[in-house]
Amino acid sequence: MKMEPYWKYLYNNVDGMGEQSISLFKYSAKCIALKCSQEFGRGFSKNLKAIGGRFNMNLKFGEIPEPGWIFKLESQEELQKFISSVQKKEILPKVVDQKTEKQENIILFRKLKELLDIIPDEGEDFIISESNGFRTYITFDDDENSVYSVKSSKKKMNVCQVRI
C-alpha cells in the first residue's frame, strides 16, 4: 500500500541545485517523514539534524524501501519553519562536491586501515591530533565519542573526537 504525502512542495531553484521536490508524510502516530532528493538532504543535513531529524535509508512509503528523514511529531512546527526559510532563501544549502567527498573518504579509510594493522589492539588510546579545539584519538573499546569505525576480521578500531 502506497503512503500519500500530506504536504508537497516543488522548489524551482534551490541555490544551484535545480528543481527539488520535497514531501511530508505522517509516518506513524509519533513520527513524520520528509522525502527529498539525496542532493537536497545532503545540502541541508546539518539543518535537518539540528531539528532532530534522523536519516534512514529504508523508510516505507510504498512497497520499496526509500531513503528519507524521520522526525518526532513534536518537531513538525520547527520543520515547517525550516522549509519556509529555504523557500525564502534565508537558509542556503552547503555545497557538496560528491567526487571530492568520495575521494576524501577513500583516502581516510585507507589511512585508517593502515593504522589498524600497525597499532596494537590492547593498551592506551592512540592520539592522532589535537587541533582546532578537538582531540582526535583511536580506541579499541566502544566509545560514545566515536565518529568513525573500521573493522577487519581480527580487530575493530573506533576513531573518536572530543572537545578540549
Image: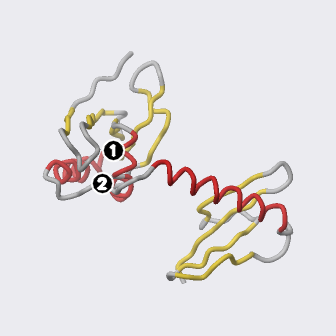
Q: Secondary structure at mark 1?
A: helix
Q: Say above or below: 65 vs 136.
A: above
Give the number of the disc on residue 159: none
Q: Residue 158 at what x, y percent from top left?
A: 69, 62
Q: Check the picture and name the quadrant holding the C terminus.
A: bottom right
In the depicted structure, whether residue 31 falls above or below residue 110: above
Classify 73 as above or below 29: below
Residue 45, placed above or below residue 160: above
- Amino acid at dot 2: Pro
Q: Position of residue 121 (x, y in %)?
A: 84, 66
Quarter of the image with the N terminus is top left
Q: Are marks 2 and 1 in contact (CB under 8 Å)?
A: yes
What residue appears at the point 77 percent right and 65 percent down from the top-left corner? 115
Spot occupied by residue 37 in the image (x, y as percentages of width and height): 36, 37
Q: For the residues marked 2 and 1, what is the alpha-carbon distance in whole angstroms?
A: 8 Å
- Count residues near mark 2 (Cα–Cα under 10 Å), then give few for <14, some for 14-19, many for 20+: many
- SS for callout 2: loop
Residue at the (37%, 43%) spot, across then down? 39
Image point 50% across, 54% down: which residue? 100
Q: Would you say 31 lies left or right of 114 here?
A: left
- Identify residue type, mark 1: Phe
Q: Nearer the viewer, residue 1 or 11?
A: 11
Point out which mark residue 40 bears.
1
Q: Quadrant of residue 23?
A: top left
Horizontal and vertical percent position of residue 150: 71, 55
Residue matched to label 2: 93
